[in-house]
Amino acid sequence: MASSQVELSADGGRVAVQVEDKFVRIRNVKVSVFAVDSREKLLEFCFDYCYWSVDPADPHYASQEEVFQDLGVSVLSGASEGYNVCLFAYGQTGSGKTYTMMGTPDSIGLTPRICQVCLRICVHVFSSLCSHFSFLEIYNERVRDLLRRGEQKKRASLRVREHPDKGPYVQDLSQHVVSDCKQAMDLLEEGIANRITAATHNHDASSRSHAIFTIQYTQAILENNLPSETVSKINLVDLAGSERADPHYCRDRLTEGSNINKSLVTLGIVISALAQNSQMSSSCQSINSMASEGDGSTVGSHSSSLSGGGGGGGGGGRRHCFIPYRDSVLTWLLKDSLGGNSKTIMIATVSPSANSYNETLSTLRYAAHARNIVNKPRVNEDANVRLIRELREEIDRLKSMLLSFEMRNPSPSLSDERDGNLSDIVLQNELKVMQMATVIFDTSSQSLVIFS
Ligand SMILES: Nc1ncnc2c1ncn2[C@@H]1O[C@H](COP(=O)(O)OP(=O)(O)OP(=O)(O)O)[C@@H](O)[C@H]1O
């Protein structure tokens, strides 16, 4: 990209963005090379992956396949390990969010590719198990089902509710069982066609809503000789143009402007608060680990209690920020994806043109913030199977304690009482495990498919 300063972008502006390996550089072309002022001419950002996809003839051009191999494959591997995964595209209008997430008929994007592979895995590996798809849009802070048919279609807006364990969800959102690729592609096309779009100053089919496509992916596995189900959720999100967070945009469409604004502005607040909390936790952890390095006897205990502290407490006497997830429908629905039980990837799409300098810089800063967030994903395993595994681990731990106790105290009179207590606990746990294992076999023998 050595010649990028003199290249012109599609909108006639000078190319102001350079991509090299994991770095994106943005040049402020208004600042003269000789100027002596406080404005910076070149700013650099580092991300996990950076792609250049302006001109297919460019040797550095990143194809949809390349993006899928990096990001789509990690979404699928996260889901197959039992994690919730979220991938969302953020950027100004016309910068390529929908192209990246959905693609075009000639160049399909991440969502159809992920669906296809997901279904292939379900069909070949899990024989009769299949995935559930749903597709919604958030428009003017209202949730619309993009896959609702017939009479039900008339019910315009759906309610968001929150389950104490499963988190926020959309009540009455249609779920579609899909068993082959054709069905999946038809559903995707139907949903995309139902999305609200409009012409904007630089994009004649601009998405005015935030779209969330969800795949619920169920796997049956055999763990410690017990059948178990893990259910992972893949959220694929195509946001409306980020300039809608700017109060000066869309003055003529006041209602739409202000509502889309609300979701995107709240998203910005949530991301920066989460990044701040994550940084605070990591600095507390390093202070604690430095402290415990000086006092070798207690290594580990402090740092593990801190990392388990969730979003509220926090150590070191400093308070974690409140995260206003419920201030907008988008952040409420993506609560887990943004700061909880999910492996999340943010794709920031930018225009290479100098005409979009401010918007591009703000998108890159946004993404740099989001990169600091540390989520706490966990495998969504069956609660009973998890309990059995924990009890078995406890039994093993108690048995080894008993053994070492007996070895250290050969005189029976000293250790009798303690031995008796430990043996009782081991026995009780073993009984619990047996009872639970029987219940799981009884209730699940009809519904689970175990792959060989
Ligand atoms: N990397 C790319 N290669 C080829 N065409 C692209 C690429 N990125 C975007 N486009 C094309 O540019 C146009 C705008 O892209 P797209 O619809 O993805 O923008 P967007 O960010 O989703 O915009 P909006 O927020 O307004 O919906 C589309 O015609 C799309 O096909």
Image: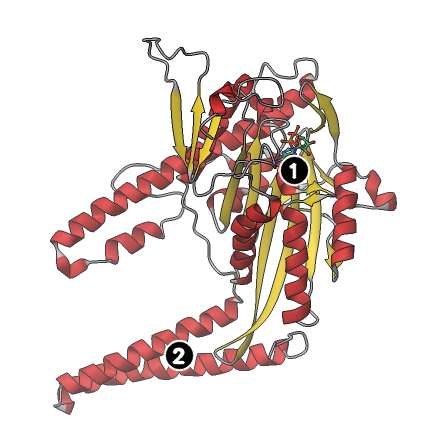
Q: Which residue is mark 1?
A: 99
SS of the residue at dot 2? Answer: helix
Q: Is residue 336 left or right of residue 428?
A: right
What residue do we see at 61% from left, 35% from top? 97
For badge 2, the amino acid type reads Asn
For badge 1, the amino acid type reads Tyr
Mark 1 CB within 8 Å of ligand 1: yes
Q: Quadrant of the C terminus?
A: bottom right
Where 303 falls versus 12 (above or below)? Answer: below
**Which image quadrant is residue 395 in?**
bottom left
Where 168 falls versus 251 (above or below)? Answer: below
Mark number, residue 429: 2
Discs 1, 2 touching: Cβ within 8 Å: no
Mark 2 CB within 8 Å of ligand 1: no
Q: CA distance from mark 1 to mark 2?
A: 54 Å
Q: Is residue 410 left or right of residue 369?
A: left
